[in-house]
C-alpha cells in the first residue's frame, strides 16, 4: 500500500468525566488535539479529519489548520461519530479509514501507517488494530488495561479487561505471554458502517469493549505488534503531566 491510500478520522469531544476539555489542554505549548492531528498528517494519510460536536474544539482545530466535520451530539462512542462522517455521500465502501483517538498525542505516525498497511494486506479482514507486549504484572491485573489474545496468524480471538490468557493449573507465571491492546483501529468503510448499525452484544456490554461486537458479528480483526510503542494517552491531569515529561525528555 502506498502512502495516501487511507484517511484518518479523529473523534473529538469536549466532555470527559475525568478531565473535561482535555483535548484542548496545553501540552508542550499546543493543544493535545493538535499533537494528535500533526502525527496523523505525518503518517502519510490522504486526508485527516477532526469529527466533533463542540464548537470550542471546532474553532481550535480550524485554528491549527485541521479539516473539521461537525457531527451529532448524541453519539455513544467515537466509533459512532466517525461512522457518521463515513456514511456521508462520496465515501467508497472499500475506503480504508483509521480511527485515531483525540487523547493520544504520543501515538507515533508510524503506528498509524502500520495499522492501515496491515488491513490493506488482508482483504478478507474488516478491521485491524495493534498491540504491545505486556510484561508488567500490575498492568496484567489492571482492568483499565485491555488485553487481547490472537491466533498464530494474527487474527484476534478475544479482548478483555480481565487477565488473559489466564495462568492455568500447573502453569508457571514465567510462561505467560500477554498483549496490551492499543486503541487504534483501521476499518474498511463498509465494515465500519455495519458495525455501528448493529446492536451491542452482551459480551461488549459486560466488558465495556466495543470491538467485541465486531467479533460477535463474525468480523475478522487483524492484529499487529506496534513498530513503535506509543507514549501515554491523556485521560487525567496526571496523564497530561506524564506526557509533558515524555516530550521534554525528547
Image: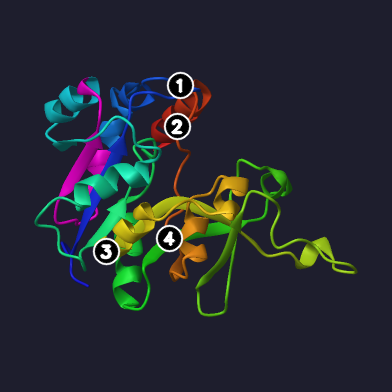
- Distance, label 4 to label 2, CA atoms, is 20 Å
* Residue at screen point 29% across, 29% down: 73
Q: Determine the image quadrant of residue 104.
A: top left
Q: Nearer the viewer, residue 64 or 79?
A: 79
Residue 218: x and y, percent? 47, 70
Determine the secondary structure under disc 4: strand
Residue 72: x and y, percent? 25, 33
Reading the image, the residue beneath label 3 is 190
Q: Nearer the viewer, mark 3 or mark 1?
A: 3
Do callouts 1 and 2 mark residues in contact (Cβ within 8 Å)? Answer: yes
Reading the image, the residue beneath label 1 is 19
Reading the image, the residue beneath label 2 is 234
Q: Nearer the viewer, mark 3 or mark 2?
A: 3
Name which of mark 1 and mark 2 comes first in the sequence.
Answer: 1
Q: Nearer the viewer, mark 4 or mark 3?
A: 3
Residue 136: x and y, percent? 68, 49
Q: Nearer the viewer, mark 4 or mark 2?
A: 4
Amino acid at each position: 500500500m502506498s502512502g495516501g491510500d487511507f484517511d484518518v478520522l479523529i473523534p473529538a469531544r469536549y466532555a470527559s468525566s475525568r478531565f473535561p476539555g482535555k483535548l484542548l489542554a496545553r501540552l508542550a505549548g499546543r493543544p493535545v488535539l493538535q499533537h494528535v492531528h500533526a502525527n496523523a498528517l505525518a503518517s502519510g494519510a490522504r486526508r485527516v479529519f477532526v469529527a466533533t460536536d463542540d464548537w470550542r474544539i471546532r474553532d481550535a482545530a480550524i485554528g491549527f489548520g485541521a479539516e473539521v466535520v461537525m457531527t451529532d451530539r448524541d453519539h455513544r462512542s467515537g466509533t459512532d461519530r466517525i461512522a457518521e462522517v463515513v456514511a456521508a455521500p462520496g465515501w467508497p465502501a472499500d475506503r480504508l479509514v483509521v480511527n485515531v483517538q483525540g487523547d493520544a498525542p504520543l501515538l507515533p505516525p508510524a503506528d498509524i501507517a502500520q495499522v492501515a498497511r496491515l488491513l490493506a494486506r488482508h482483504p478478507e479482514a474488516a478491521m485491524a488494530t495493534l498491540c504491545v507486549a505486556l510484561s508488567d504484572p500490575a498492568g496484567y491485573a489492571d482492568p483499565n488495561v485491555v488485553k487481547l489474545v490472537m491466533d498464530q496468524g494474527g487474527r484476534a480471538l478475544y479482548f478483555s479487561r480481565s487477565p488473559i490468557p489466564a495462568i492455568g493449573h500447573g502453569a508457571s507465571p514465567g510462561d505467560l505471554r500477554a498483549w496490551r491492546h492499543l486503541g487504534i483501529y483501521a476499518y474498511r468503510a463498509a465494515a465500519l458502517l455495519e458495525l455501528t448499525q448493529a446492536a451491542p452484544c452482551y459480551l461488549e456490554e459486560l466488558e465495556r469493549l466495543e470491538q467485541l461486537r465486531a467479533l460477535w458479528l463474525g468480523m475478522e480483526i487483524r492484529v499487529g505488534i506496534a513498530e513503535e510503542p506509543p507514549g501515554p494517552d491523556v485521560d487525567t491531569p496526571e496523564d497530561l503531566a506524564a506526557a509533558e515529561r515524555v516530550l521534554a525528555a525528547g
